[in-house]
Amino acid sequence: MPAAKRTEPPRRIRIAHPAPVVDGGRYAPKRTVGDTVDVQADIFRDGHEKLRAVVKYKAPGGRRWLEAPMTHLDPHVNGVRWGGSFTVETTGTWQFTIEAWSDVWATWHDELRRKVEANLGEDLSGELSEGVVLLTNSGSKHPAVKEALETLEDPQATPQAKYDAALGNELFEAMEAIQTRRGKTTLDKSLPLEVDRVKARFGAWYELFPRSWGGLKETEKLIPELADLGFDVLYLLPIHPIGRNKRKGRNNSLIAGPDDPGSPYAIGAEEGGHDAVHPELGTQQDVVDLCKTAHRHGMDVCFDLALNASADHPWLTEHPEWFQQRPDGTLKYAENPPKSYQDIYNFNWDTEAWESLWQAWLDIVLHWVKAGVKFYRVDNPHTKPFPFWEWLIKEVHKVDRDVVFLAEAFTKRAVMQELAKLGFTQSYTYFTWKNSRWELTEYVNELAHGEEREYFRPNFFPVTPDILHAYLVHGGPPAFVTRLVLAATLSPSYGIYSGFEHFENVPVREGSEEYLNSEKYEIRERALDGPLLPMIRRMNEIRRENPALQHLSNVRFLDAQNDALIAYAKQEPGNTVIVIANVDPHHAQEGLVVIPAQLGLPPVFTVEELFTGDHFDWRIGGNYVRLDPGGNQTHVLRVL
Amino acid sequence: MPAAKRTEPPRRIRIAHPAPVVDGGRYAPKRTVGDTVDVQADIFRDGHEKLRAVVKYKAPGGRRWLEAPMTHLDPHVNGVRWGGSFTVETTGTWQFTIEAWSDVWATWHDELRRKVEANLGEDLSGELSEGVVLLTNSGSKHPAVKEALETLEDPQATPQAKYDAALGNELFEAMEAIQTRRGKTTLDKSLPLEVDRVKARFGAWYELFPRSWGGLKETEKLIPELADLGFDVLYLLPIHPIGRNKRKGRNNSLIAGPDDPGSPYAIGAEEGGHDAVHPELGTQQDVVDLCKTAHRHGMDVCFDLALNASADHPWLTEHPEWFQQRPDGTLKYAENPPKSYQDIYNFNWDTEAWESLWQAWLDIVLHWVKAGVKFYRVDNPHTKPFPFWEWLIKEVHKVDRDVVFLAEAFTKRAVMQELAKLGFTQSYTYFTWKNSRWELTEYVNELAHGEEREYFRPNFFPVTPDILHAYLVHGGPPAFVTRLVLAATLSPSYGIYSGFEHFENVPVREGSEEYLNSEKYEIRERALDGPLLPMIRRMNEIRRENPALQHLSNVRFLDAQNDALIAYAKQEPGNTVIVIANVDPHHAQEGLVVIPAQLGLPPVFTVEELFTGDHFDWRIGGNYVRLDPGGNQTHVLRVL
């Protein structure tokens, strides 16, 4: 005897393998406002009963579950997959579940139909008597129900007349409309969905050191031009006071000269810590003003959240319990031997005072959120505890759901995935090191079509102040063009760091990924006059004009019959963009880009090169392309 | 501030994607006694700390968790997968989990080693002071610890002497042996593993209608010969009293003649129901005797559990609440229109009296378990509720864990999978309809290497009393030989129904899968004298002599450069068997069976044909094979 007494037998319907889901519901798949969410599940039961199912969904803070119908996707192959969809209209945590039940009328209808069609001459009056009960119990006043009942209960009606009455379409629809949900079953628990603002998915970023541009007020003056160039996010390297003790000199030297400004990552001085502004850059009010101006131009300001302290950070004396002190009294500086950051101290995340430490960081972020900073590029999140980030991001989102966190973690794939799962809105990627056709194809296919597509949003940066790849060092301007087009067309979010448009590519020494005279350790004079800017402006325009470039999982790589040419199509309804890039910065390359029939294009079609305005006739099958570092290194083609 | 006050910060280690697991732990993977269970998981944390991990496991009813070490499987590719194993020695539900922690000494040791090796000339006395604390706090009396402490605390010792002392291997092992489990983390919940007797995985079945062999006593006399033929399970079609009302006649005719015995699936008559024995077959004591004799010969008896009632079943009057009555008072007979079973009534699984109905079936099974019947082939389990089966199998296993349930469900893949997941020990399969090379390759690869391998144990029957495939109808004896060898060598469990060894292949009409003069509706005179029996005997011997044939997931299909030849290798340590079968029953076929280097065989090796005793020289690469319906239709080769 089953342990617990129940009034009705346990549910017969199983709902399994729902999607979208991340780790069985432990984490939330990500979407952006306006997205249609495709929900699927295996739905089945024992026996031959007909099933019905709906998606039930609830908006953040909503009280009511809404419903969308699900349909059986693959009945013809004896499949059990059902699908339905709904649209998410606000940011925040949505919930969804699936409800399925047995459709008593449809089951009865189907059995009767099959028996009548088999025409075995059986007496079906038992079956018809069931139908009468179902119709009567429905309580429906629908004329089709009334009419059918009259025929079924008419002793004069022929069997065929009764079958016709019972199997009528109008009757079927009337009964379906009022069906009770027999044996109704739902998922054990509803599943979450995190919905972000659209800029969490689609945006162009520009990264700069404010001190190289004359401080915050001067940076604010760049906003109209940056907006005109098509940038959505202005990302500032840390703007806080910089430690003097153990300050680093130019080119990462251990001893700073008297005028060396130090690394902005060595945060904290007598002027303050993470909630302060470096006096030479400006004031708190300047941050507020900068953000206001940016918002007025449709842009956002991104801060660099580096959880480091210089030797002069006020917290070292105010909260020694937050730091790792050695038995001999020395502090541990940040390091990943043999790499060392002698000007930076780590926090001790295992401290017993962890709660006040966590709270202090939350206060810092909320301080800047209040000032108007809605984007945070987080430095090395993979060396701080996962539970901390999960908590911090949730707490910040309680105050302002529009805040975006970009994880700067270049580490094990599983760790990068975990950070994305637990809440980081976007992530840096391995893109910077993927330069050949096969590397890019493999990696982007994984991001776009693998399990990560549900929660890991890449942001492709061709360079960062830490990473100047040998491909750019040796490839020169044609390499920069290729990398720009790849970053901006493969990933809906991409960004450049302000040396990029100048083709800056001299490393501190051969084989190093560090820049010579890196801005991390010295002030450079910068202006928005790089020779690549016109192309960048047009690239950003193209991205905005073509919805296909605003998504990731719509990419399909194409054969180009030449390993030096990478080609792919991206498609959204009514918009097909085909990109071809020469990944060889030294030689012209030619090939045949193969358009497969599955793209759904006509046999012959016209494409427009979106940078040059040229028109070409293309077709399903091979299309000749020649790309030349001396002329066009890429094609971005829109199908007309 | 986090909601709940805690004394230490939340765990930093993540343990994800453990295996083996079925649907996140909702169901139990299956193993058999003596199996080594390979456990894996992704294990990682933030930062660069060194991790350690163990599998913890507990035997059924056990009180203590035992531990087995895990090792990092792919550190060289920055992977996070760890693996370990343990052996299951008894039947029942085992539990396992994974525990991981940060290894403080190894982390310290690794950082110091990297710094010393980088040889940056830094002052490492801070690092060494940490080492002293770790050694002192360990409380170890190990001489290596004592010795290292002396050097580290000796003001006269050189830095190099201190590094050598700190980084010594003996010291490392001493410290590893006594490490505390810092930041210890386990899976949220332990995972189940169902362990069955070996015969649940590996066995040869013989299926017969006892009435065609003279009843239970005569059937008992077959046991020594069946055991000698190599059979492990004797499967009896239902032996209960058969209804007279609406009894079916020969060849499924709706009207039975006076001497027609009826279908044994129309269970129940005035002589009793599912707990009774048909008086013409024998007595309850005969069942007990049969089981005793079978067990004495190492065999088991399997009953056919059909949850049907004839119109004369005692329960129809004793428990009308268990049946589906129509509004007009008629009962619903079993059907899947246009197929009808007019002699059989369905139970109403939605009855309010479901608890007494469930209990009645449990009582029936336990009645026969008590008589010695440990195997149950369950008729159409997919038309009864999933929760019922999950409960029934668990309850039976509480009484006798050796009971085996074989699901006879030919239906949607997802439903067959669900039955296997919820507890059925074995399952019938689509094998009967897979006759071409590609069909077999695809299907067996799915079963052997897909997710189902964890819980779905196939039992391959070339025929059943319900299914005579056209391949056998048109292929004749060569087709029977091929199907026997495929069933017996692809699947560890296989079975034949007693017309098979006589090459019985006449359908009731062309295009039907029903036998002419099916034993389901009439009594046939049977004896163990079929012409295929000598080959079957040898086949069973070969299966017992070759461990490779006792497992499923060790199969690897081989190219034979001819679509009419199917070839595969199965390997266990020290035993490689290569099988080639001609799936064309009409023509000789030749090909080159390609042995890949990955099998680990020497460049040239000798194989023995296990039916003929012939020896051949084979090699890595192509090996010529010719199979002829007139001579050898298959090769079963053992690598010597």
Image (tube, coloured by chain):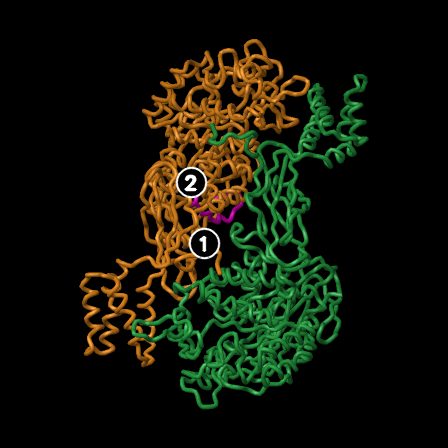
Chain colours: A orange, B green
Image quadrant where residue B290 sits: bottom right
Say what amino acid the circle numbered 1 marks. Answer: Ala
Give the position of the C terminus of chain B as an image quadrant: bottom right
The answer to if B221 sits in the magenta stretch is no
Residue A66 in the image: state x and y as whole percent. Answer: 31, 46
Q: Nearer the viewer, residue A379 or B171?
A: B171
Q: Residue furthest bottom?
A: B258
Disc 1 or disc 2, which is closer to the eye?
1
Q: Does residue A548 lie above or below B182 as drawn?
A: below
Q: Secondary structure at mark 1?
A: strand
Circle nearer the N terminus (1, 2): 1
Q: Nearer the viewer, residue A222 or A538?
A: A222
Left or right: where does residue A100 sit relative to residue B166? left
Would you call the spot at circle 1 few (<14 residues within 10 Å), some (14-19), or many (20 or more)?
some
- Disc marking residue A16: 1
Left or right: where does residue B7 sit relative to residue A567? right
Residue A306 in the image: state x and y as whole percent. Answer: 51, 24
Say what amino acid the circle numbered 2 marks. Answer: Lys
Left or right: where does residue B73 sit relative to residue A567? right
In the rendered structure, are the residues bearing label 1 and label 2 in contact, judged by CB atoms less than 8 Å apart? Answer: no
Q: What is the CA distance from the residue labelled 1 to the residue labelled 2? A: 21 Å
Residue on which disc 2 sits: A30
The residue located at (50%, 74%) in the rendering is: B274
Magenta extent: A552-566
Q: Secondary structure at mark 2?
A: strand
- Asked if residue A521 can be seen in this view, the reply is no
